[in-house]
Image: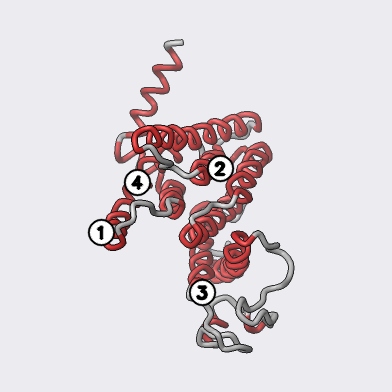
Amino acid sequence: MTRPALAWPVWLAFGSCLGSFLNVCIYRMPKEQSIVWPASRCPHCEKPIAWFDNIPVVSWLLLRARCRNCRKPILWRYPVVELLTGLMTVATFARFGVGPVGLIYVAFVCALIVVSFIDLEFQIIPDEISLGGLVVALVLSLLVPQLHGTDARLVGVGRAVIGMLVGGGLLYGTGMLGDFLFKKESMGGGDIKLLAMAGAVLGWKAVLLTFFLAPILALPPGLVILLTKKEHVIPYGPFLSLALVVSLFFGALVLRVTGLEDSIQLITDYYRYSH
């Protein structure tokens, strides 16, 4: 049998090509443009990009980060997204396999990459990803219940719904409390919908961990921005996304090492046997 590591270059190439498509989504979705048509073109001169100038990462290096036609610069974001998507594809397939669950997780990570870069630039999270992804996640939980650790389709959907309610409910409740305390909006609706979608994919334990982990990750850059730019608001989507990736890959380990898994089990058993 072929060792998984031998497939890594193929996975990297596949993921990098996915990253090229994600760049189209990142550029066009905030502008409410079609991500399918027209074909890729330079944002400056709008000339179509030839296939040999559209090879992930490689073309950017060969062109020295400039359009072949107008010589305007090509943003660093393009190779970064392509390489990041390629590496995350390798990591996801190596961890979860190339079966249905692994493919779903790759799609989930791709959604988080798009969300992060759009939110960084435009401070929005497209509903096409959060709400659309939520619907897709519920359907996939029925078709692939193994996503939630069961072979029973209805159990899979039930766990997805619980994850959705916990993910969205946690941020919604936090936002309501913040609005009351600070007399202004403290949590964007896009963040709430994103964590609801993530809960439908990963389950309630993962989004509970994400809820506590994301503010820790956001604190250092938030302080830097506060001290340097005197701004109190930062895009939260990238930190939610990073926390979700950590929860996806290491959530079970973190819950076990910190003792949170035992605490959750005690609470679950209490409510199970006391009613």
| Amino acid at the residue labelled 2 | Met
Give the camera-side residue of 140 and 198: 198
Label whose residue precedes the other's in the sequence (1 or 4): 4
Residue at horizontal 52 percent and vertical 59 percent from the top = 118
| Amino acid at the residue labelled 3 | Pro
Give the camera-side residue of 126 and 184: 184
Q: Nearer the viewer, mark 2 or mark 1?
A: 1
Label whose residue precedes the other's in the sequence (3 or 4): 3
User: Does residue 88 appear left or right of residue 161 in this picture?
Assistant: left
Q: Residue furthest top?
A: 275
Name the residue carrying label 1: 227
Label whose residue precedes the other's in the sequence (3 or 2): 3
Name the residue carrying label 3: 79
Q: Secondary structure at mark 4?
A: helix
**Mark number displayed over residue 197:** 2
The residue carrying pointer 4 sits among few (fewer than 14), some (14 to 19) or many (20 or more) residues within 10 Å by Cα, namely some
Q: CA distance from mark 1 to mark 4?
A: 18 Å
